[in-house]
Image (spheres, rainbow, N blue to C red):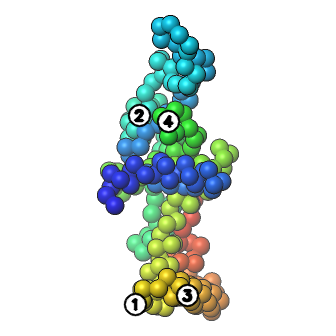
Amino acid sequence: MGADQIRKLKPEFLRELAGRGETFVAELPKTFTGWIRQPRVPRRPFRRGRGRGRETPRLRCDNRPAISAENMLKYSPELRDQPWVRYRVKDGEKGPMVWEVEHTMITVKDEKGLPGMRLHLMVARNILKAEEIKYFVSNAAEEVPLQTLLLAAFSRWRVERCFEDQKQEVGLDQWEDRRWLGLKQHLIITSVSYLFLARVCKRLRGKQSGPDGVPGAYCRSGAGAELAA
């Protein structure tokens, strides 16, 4: 699936997640659009000339158009004038990884182009590579701490590490068959085997974080949203 198709499907995918009652933190491209200030939608019938007015909700003419997240960062006072706050999001093999973060609430479009979900918008910039900027959104409650949202946003590496370990250690990718039931059984067996090995390794290792200080998939120091010194 191409990048353009993924961009088009993501808003719909997030709406489906919210409709199922799921709380998410998702990374989106800088081109996704929304409003920082809630746009107004009149409810009175729309009338053009004579006849019965239409009751379809619509945006007011004096509303500002939705803009991309990239332009929000450049031109919206809520982000442009907000100071960057540094967070240590995780410890990598070469040391702590620190990102600067700005945060605000935005409203995104629904399937009809009207104001939809109210989301957290987190803009994270790598302090070592200023051109590397990530955009995250979340439908968590407004009172959820930013540290919690960042922990979820930057924890994808844990999942990737688990898949990598399962392929290397317990043969997750060593399967040749065409039956769904057999594949399902293989996934279950490898996942249970990996869980067993991880728990044994954690119990035997004790307080050690890992060989040569490299964080493992179950090391608490490997990921955490903490305010950097």
Report which residue position mark 3 lands on. 185
Report which residue position mark 4 lands on. 112
Foreground label between 2 and 4: 4
- Kindly report the distance in space between the C-alpha atoms of the residues bearing marks 3 and 1: 13 Å
Within 10 angstroms of label 1, few (less than 14), some, or many (20 or more) residues?
A: few
- Kindly report the distance in space between the C-alpha atoms of the residues bearing marks 2 and 1: 48 Å
Image position, residue 129 (x, y; %): 33, 55
Kind of residue indicated by mark 4:
Lys
Label 4: element kind = loop
Image position, residue 125 (x, y; %): 41, 51
Kind of residue indicated by mark 3:
Gln
Foreground label between 2 and 1: 1
Report which residue position mark 1 lands on. 176
Asked if the residues shown at circle 1 and circle 4 are in contact, with their CB atoms under 8 angstroms apart, the answer is no
* Left or right: where 206 falls relative to 184: right
Q: Earlier in the sequence, mark 3 or mark 4?
A: 4
Q: Residue at x 56, y 26 (%)?
A: 57
Q: Earlier in the sequence, mark 2 or mark 1?
A: 2
Q: Is residue 18 above or below residue 165?
A: above
Q: Please identify the quarter of the rendering in which residue 74 is found.
A: top left
Image position, residue 213 (x, y; %): 49, 80
Comparing 130 with 95, the one in front is: 130
